[in-house]
Image: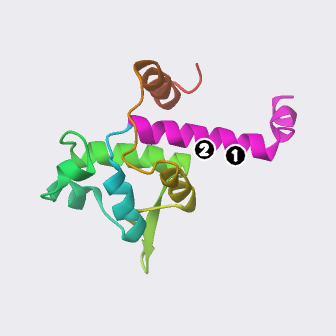
């Protein structure tokens, strides 16, 4: 029964929901606009990001490579980022997807931070999706 209901959801409504979830994640995660602009032009790995001298211009705080990777996996699941592919297969590097470009275009300046309730909703959506 649930499968049939899911199949009847309007694709435009489903796309709006996907965009809304991805937009919310971009506002809640520590990556600044400059990070997304950077990965729209070239692929970047978590280790490379954490070793950069300009890390503060790309990311709030000082995340570890493991934490960056965890955030990237979430953004990949939401459709904002994708793994770079080379002749050997998938790499540890990421790039911005067309959906990510579309979302980034909605903010002419820095990505606005999210309020407390939005951050809580995002955390629950990410860590407790079945609630």
Label 1 crowd bin: few (<14), some (14–19), many (20+), radius 10 Å: few
- Give the residue at x 40% y 38%: 112
Towards the viewer: 113 or 9: 113
- Relative to 3, does residue 123 appear above or below in the rendering? above
- Give the residue at x 27% y 45%: 66
Q: Image check: 15 left or right of 19? A: right
Quadrant into which the C terminus falls:
top right
Q: Mark 2 points at which residue?
A: 19
- Relative to 62, does residue 51 appear above or below in the rendering? below
Task: Give residue 61's position: percent from left, percent from top.
Answer: 20, 39
- Give the residue at x 82% y 41%: 10
Q: Name the residue under label 1.
A: 15
Q: Do the residues labelled 1 and 2 touch (CB within 8 Å)?
A: yes
- Give the residue at x 46% y 43%: 74
Task: Give residue 125's position: percent from left, percent from top.
Answer: 52, 28
Q: Image check: 8 left or right of 33? A: right
Give the magenta range. Answer: 1-28
Q: What element carries label 2?
A: helix
Q: Can residue 92 be seen in this view?
A: no
Task: Give residue 90's position: percent from left, percent from top.
Answer: 44, 67
Q: In which quarter of the image is residue 52?
A: bottom left
Q: In which quarter of the image is residue 48?
A: bottom left
Label 2 crowd bin: few (<14), some (14–19), many (20+), radius 10 Å: some
């Amino acid at each position: 029964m649930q499968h049939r209901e899911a199949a009847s959801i309007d694709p435009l409504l489903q796309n709006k929901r996907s965009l809304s979830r991805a937009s919310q994640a971009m506002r809640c995660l520590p990556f600044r606009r400059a990070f997304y602009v950077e990965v729209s032009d070239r692929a970047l790995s978590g280790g490379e990001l954490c070793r950069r001298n300009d890390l503060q211009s790309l990311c709030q705080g000082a995340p570890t490579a493991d934490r960056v990777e965890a955030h990237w996996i979430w953004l990949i699941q939401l459709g904002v980022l994708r793994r770079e592919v080379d002749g050997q297969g998938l790499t540890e590097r990421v790039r911005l997807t067309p959906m990510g470009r579309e979302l980034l275009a909605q903010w002419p300046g820095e990505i606005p931070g999210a309020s407390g309730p939005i951050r809580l909703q995002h955390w629950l959506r990410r860590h407790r999706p079945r609630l």
